[in-house]
Image (cartoon, helix red, strand yellow):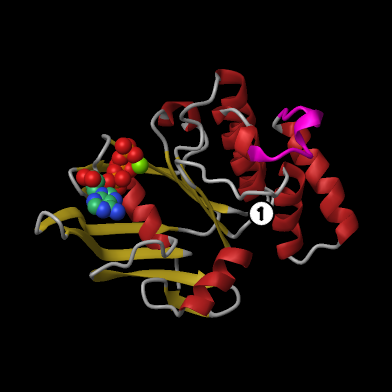
Amino acid sequence: MENLLEIKGLSKTFTLHNLGKHIRAVSGIEIDVKEGEFVGITGKSGSGKSTVLKCIYGTYRLEEGSILYDSKRFGPVDLARVSETEMLYLRKHEIGYVSQFLNVMPRTTARQLVKQAILEMGNDECVADQETVKILTHFELSEELWDSYPATFSGGEKLRLNIARAMVKKPRLLLLDEPTASLDQESKLKVKVLIQQLMEEGTTMLGIFHDLEFMNNLCNKEYKMERGSFSLQGS
Ligand SMILES: Nc1ncnc2c1ncn2[C@@H]1O[C@H](COP(=O)(O)OP(=O)(O)OP(=O)(O)O)[C@@H](O)[C@H]1O
Ligand SMILES: [Mg+2]
């Protein structure tokens, strides 16, 4: 495969059973992401941006189209058609996702959450402990929060933890759904620094950004969503 990710003719319709209605969220989506690229998605609220990322991550099944991904473990696979076991493997080891809305696991401390993510990538305990401290410090989560449950964290603290957990894995492909949307300028900068660092280490990223200008000098290309379909900007 020439690209790490190739989306062809992706369409997704939602059926609202109670209303007997169909909503065509996206159609005919085509995206190419080369290995090592940072690709941005912009567009109005409700235009279907999150739907595309959720199709890639396997949260939604699509009706039409294919999502080719060049897996390290399995070789080229169609994410729309992989088995559940394969998808779970890929989520654990190759594809990361930062969702727009955070749902935290109950009864797991911030430290455990991050450490668990690192261990899943096959690192040993000692490395995991060190890396956990490093990333929690980077995102300025105060030390007294490390061993508490994220359920009581503020919105921004939850978000920073969520990003820390996804980024610390250094996945091959990282999907970001507005990771900086509700953060203050300083926290946004921290996210940007890590994105830059991950790029240098070879992580490929596809991210939805409300404020792509903020990321502009990092972004290799931009797709703009308009009422459910995509167009490539510039170039
Ligand atoms: N699970 C679902 N069931 C029914 N409709 C859905 C579902 N998920 C998304 N939609 C619809 O699909 C359309 C696109 O939603 P999506 O969340 O992808 O938009 P978005 O571009 O991410 O918007 P925002 O910028 O507000 O996050 C919307 O009209 C939404 O109502
Ligand atoms: Mg969205």
Instruction: Indicate left or right for 67 with 220 as reference.
Output: left
Label 1 beta carbon less than 8 Å to ligand 2: no
Instruction: Indicate left or right for 57 with 231 as reference.
Output: right
Q: Which of 83 and 44 is in front in this view?
A: 83
Within the image, what quadrant is residue 56 found in? bottom left
Is residue 34 shown above or below 215?
A: below
Q: Where is residue 173 in the image (x, y as percent from the top left)?
A: 54, 58
Ligand 2 rendered quadrant: top left
* 191 inside magenta stretch: no
Q: Mark 1 points at which residue?
A: 170
Q: Where is residue 19 in the image (x, y as percent from the top left)?
A: 11, 54
Magenta stretch prevailing secondary structure: loop
Q: Where is residue 229 in the image (x, y as percent from the top left)?
A: 20, 50
Q: In the image, what residue type sits under mark 1?
A: Lys
* 147 inside magenta stretch: yes
Q: Nearer the viewer, residue 54 or 41?
A: 54
Q: Nearer the viewer, residue 120 or 74?
A: 120
The residue located at (22%, 70%) in the rendering is 64
Element under label 1? loop
Q: Position of residue 94 (x, y in %)?
A: 59, 64
The residue located at (53%, 25%) in the rendering is 183
Q: What stretch is highlighted in magenta?
A: 140-150
The residue located at (54%, 29%) in the rendering is 155
Please, which residue is most extreme toward the right here? 126
Is the C terminus in the top left, top right, bottom left or bottom right quadrant? top left
Instruction: Indicate left or right for 87 with 51 as reference.
Output: right
Instruction: Indicate left or right for 96 with 25 as reference.
Output: right
Whether residue 223 appears in this view of the structure is no
Q: Nearer the viewer, residue 135 or 143?
A: 143
